[in-house]
Image (cartoon, rainbow, N blue to C red):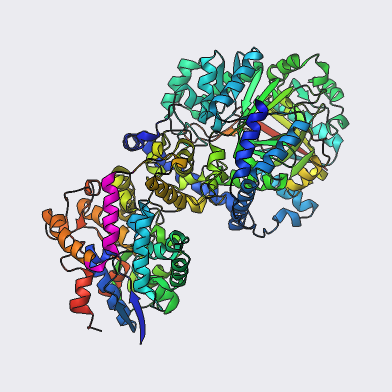
Amino acid sequence: MEQNVRDEILAKLKAAPKAIVPTRPHLPPYKTLSMDREQLIAEFTARLAEEAVVVHRVKDLRAAQDKLSEVAVEEGLKKVMTSTDDVISQLDLPAWGKKNDIQVMTPHEFPDRFSYRDAVFDQAQAGITGADFAVAESATIGLIHNKDQARLISLAPILHIAIVPVDRIVPVYEKVMEKVFAKKGEYPSQFVFISGPSMTGDIQGVLFKGMHGPRKVIVILVG
Amino acid sequence: MKEVSLFIPCTVDLFAPRIGEAVVHILRRVGVNPIYHEEQTCCGQPAMNAGYREEAKKVAKHFISVFEKDPVIVSPAGSCVYMVKDHYPEILKDEPDWFRRAKELAPRVYEFSQYLVDVLKVEDVGASFEGKVTYHESCHILRGLGISEQPKKLIQAVKGVQLAPLDNADSCCGFGGEFANDFPDISESMVKEKVENFLASGADLLLLNEPGCFLNIGGYLNRNHPGKKIMHLASFLATNGREAEYGN
Amino acid sequence: MEIKTEQFTELAKKELKNDRSRLFLKLIPPVMKGKREAGLASLPDAPAAMACGAAIRAEALSRLPELLQEFEKKATANGMKVVWTRDDKEANEFIKNLAKEKGIRYVTKGKSMVTEETALNELLEKNGIEVWETDLGEFIAQQLHLPPFHIVGPAINVPVEEVRDLFMRKIGLKDPTLDPVQLGYAARLFLRDKFHHVQMGITGVNMAVAETGTIINVENEGNIRFTKASPPVQVSVMSLEKVVATMEDALHMIRLVCRNCTGQRLSVYVSMDSRPKKKDEIDGPEELYIVIVDNGRSKIYQDVKARDALRCIRCGACLVACPVWRQIGGYAYGWAYSGPMGQVLNPMLLGLERTQELYRASTLCGACKSFCPVGIDHPSLFLYYRAKDVLGDPHFKSVDRPWIERQFFKMWSWAASTPWAWNMGVRMARPYINKDAKDGILSKAKGPFQGWFRSRDIPAMAGFTFHDRWKNQIKNKG
């Protein structure tokens, strides 16, 4: 039955007459493509500011840890959930947490998805992740979701802190896709672009942040 | 002397002939000799808009046979010019000979302000008017034919005139041919909004160069704001803004 | 959702008297237009970008069966389950059966226009499965049993007092606040609980990428991401025209849809799914179903001109462009799709007879066409549908026009191509039309023109037409 439905629909589509298709015009390149590293960082920072993302620039991972401590105090953080991606794993956040009297949870310590889900919904005051990419075209960070980058960490807690090494900033989304979808059969289950805090204007057009996803995003730019 | 063939739409012919007279007047003033084929009737838009393409084709063929020998055709109605240039080839595409004739005719048909400014290179037609005017951008003229600067140049060249901006100038006035009659509540809401914008502009006179819009907005003004005046651009230029009564 | 497309004129009349809607319609569209313009200005060449959008969608449509097959092949190879459904019944049945099989008691839903078309929510509810719309606007509209007012802000017109009352009734709001932000936060808490425990989520699909077998969703709130992260089962419903060839094409369309919709360079979240979660991942779906819905589209597709309506990427720009929509809002159009995009889509999906007023309620002003990032020529499609309606074309489900209208246009076109008849007709009609003229103005007249005269006058038909004036006066005055 399923095969029949599929074949029926496809047969109908294939039997249709051919149409003339308009030609694609030439598109001038995005301005970020001609920017150097510092310009890209400045552009990215400017875009983040437009989306009310708090941005801290630090020179290295050590400084990032210190900045994180400051942020934790400002935000009154006692319990956080972090991913275990390649940026975060360089920060040794479990140790950092002990030092700062903050409980640092990671998904791996949970026996199953449902207990992890409870924790990330109800207990984590913030989700801390690295960033696989950042795109200067807009206020965008890119996350490949996998065993070291669970989806709910950057979504459920009311605060999302992203540690972004500046060498991950690229000019346009295409550069990201080239890498993420490079190998057939090895695509991530999910890839997301995040551009600032969650937002809506659905009640009388009044815009506000923090509808379902995080209400606040803090980016620590490293390098 | 240069000669142009007048294409006077049925709306002007029957309900606002002074607009046609104004066109003749201005053309003569700038040294052009207008001729008028008395066999012309209508461009066929009413049938086209109602979906009666066979009937519209009949009218199109008559139009083409009346005008196809003319090197230049000028009309004070952008929607009718659009009908000829854009829709005639579309509806005649299954009749190769008529299609060819329609395609050959299309580039020779001009809207009035377009003809003066783009072809004759004339902006100052010797008119004068002390006062504030504002300009409504009719849909077929602006978006259909891409004409916007030309009428404004003609207005701005009028001695003593002040051209005030109109809010939502490019928003439809609610005429749309049959639409105004078939969807009167929505149409009324649209023309009311247009008039509110006119009143808010502070202008003494609303100018436009589309007879349908003229009849629509003018009709609403006459019923609801009898002191407020509207003129077709040709009439404005020909009479220095003096003959703004709605009737003919 | 009850289909009310036949009640357009009455609904429009009602909406014209709704002061709250009118106030909203006066204030918000100019803001949205301004945002759109600012968003487009951030592109190096906006007109070229829009033309490119049109080409991408037109190309995708011209290759539709091939791209759908490629998408299916890649998606299936990656572990997604692709299900084809011919119509609303099949799509709804599949989802219902899946939910029942899994013992699902409730689902969370990310915005999906095609499921509003198929009335999925009603079918699930009837079968004991609770449905929670989670986009704030959709949630409000769902709880108030309202159709969408605007495709992207479905309840954006609902007065804040009504939202407060609703939330106090339905979601346990205690503080009778009128602050939209506080109300939003109350909804957040309520729906958060649904996300927390959900076992099956349903989303729509903004774009399906054939090259990689990936589905893409854009959103600002995060409800779609939650629906894709929290439950072990995900169902993403896609109307079959949503496919594009490559990821590069998809990126370009995303740039366009976000700017044209809200003026954003990118919506806050863009999520791209290529497969269910891998074994070692702790969230995301174990099973991912893509339900492809036809529901009349393969039929529309047969007509090369009507096919252009399928280019639509649901940005909603045509709504705020449209001077008709800006008078009446979304309810009058009577179904899931309103504004010009509804006026080109509904007649194709429901048939021309059921939607007669929809494709006629346009002045053909062209504002929609000028805003459309995929180059749909709405006015041309309206004229095309009107012509098909006159022809009584069964493929488009149209039936006959009134006999008297046919005769009128037959006679009229004969007269308009026969000068002596035209002139005679004018002479004969004039005294009849001008019967009630006063001082050269008509404020009323007998016949089928009552609509005009409700709010307007018209000059009396000229006793001395331009024809007459030329012949007798001005011809030789040169």
Q: Quadrant of residue C478?
A: bottom left
Task: Kindly identify the residue that appears in the image at 63 percent across and 54 percent down.
Answer: C52
**Above-or-below relation of C129 to C299:** above
How many marks the image carries: the answer is 0
Residue located at (40% from left, 57% from top)? B139
Asked if residue C112 lies left or right of residue A3, the reply is left
Tell me which corner region of the image, top left, top right, bottom left or bottom right, holds residue B184.
top left
Q: C346 left or right of C52?
A: left
Relative to C219, does residue A2 appear above or below in the rendering? above
Viewer-nearest residue: A5 or A38: A5
Q: Which residues are magenta?
A: C401-420
Q: Position of residue B185 (x, y in %)?
A: 29, 43
Rendering coords of residue A183 (x, y %): 84, 40
Q: Is A70 part of what is drawn in magenta? A: no
Tell whether C265 sits left or right of A77.
left
Q: Position of residue C317 (x, y in %)?
A: 51, 45
* Residue B76 can be seen, yes or no: yes
The x and y percentages for residue C16 are 33, 38
Decide which of C101, C66 is in the foreground and name it. C66
Nearest the viewer among B181 and C15 is B181
